[in-house]
Amino acid sequence: MSIEIANESGVDVDEGLLAALARHVLDDMRVHPLAELSVLLVDEPAMTELHVRWMGEDGPTDVLAFPMDELRLPQPGGPHGDHGGPDQDPADVLLGDVVICPQVAAAQAADADHDVQDEIDLLCTHGILHLLGYDHAEPEEHATMFGLQDRLLGSWRAAAGSGSSREHGTGADLDGRQGTG
């Protein structure tokens, strides 16, 4: 699996830890082992520009997801996360880009009274789920996506040895689209 982390934010972020989290999420979601993912960390002016250009909304946001290619849709009756079986052409597994603004993440972490790295982990997971086709515009989608997000973060924390000492709420809208979830 190819996971590229590019930090253009000016904020010190543990890129190795972020890549390991992304790998954990993609492995858990059974994404093709030849999948490619890019995670870009940007400052507030760059995120504001992306947010205005692609979402038509002013100001910076915390995370944006830009799918590169359409993934093969799950088969009827199959699990939602069945993206990229062993017979899928590797050219079909270029997932796309997750763009995170650590400055916005830091403000949100302070408001939620938890660690900035926990917030960045949450945003990365959230962005990857959007790349995999999950959304939270409707109540049922919201429940599914945020439940999955919580499960993935819980298994990440357990695997990383931090147990359940880090808590994340499930109801926050994490991609800046206020009022859609």
Image (cartoon, grey):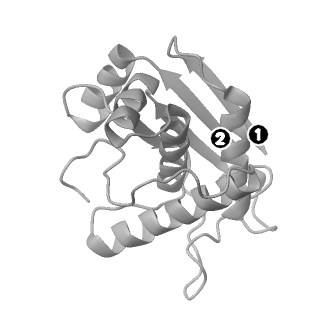
**On the rendered structure, is 61 left or right of 22?**
left
Q: Nearer the viewer, residue 102 or 70?
A: 102
Residue 21: quadrant of the picture: top right
Q: At x 70% / y 59%, what residue is drawn?
A: 31
Q: Give the percent coordinates (x, y) of residue 170.
A: 39, 60
Kind of residue at disc 2 = Leu
- Residue 117 circle label: none
Q: Give the percent coordinates (x, y) of residue 152.
A: 60, 60
- Distance of mark 2 from mark 1, alpha carbons? 6 Å
Q: Give the percent coordinates (x, y) of residue 87.
A: 80, 68
**On the rendered structure, is 145 left or right of 57?**
right
Per the image, the residue denoted by label 2 is 37
Q: Are marks 2 and 1 in contact (CB under 8 Å)?
A: yes
Looking at the rendered structure, the secondary structure element under dot 2 is strand
Per the image, the residue denoted by label 1 is 2
Return the disc, 2 or 1, that comes first in the chain's sequence. Answer: 1
Residue 101: quadrant of the picture: top left
Kind of residue at disc 1 = Ser
Q: Nearer the viewer, residue 80 or 142?
A: 142
Q: At x 69% / y 31%, what residue is drawn?
A: 4
Q: Residues within 10 Å of mark 1 (few under 14, many from 20)?
A: few
Q: Give the percent coordinates (x, y) of residue 163.
A: 67, 56
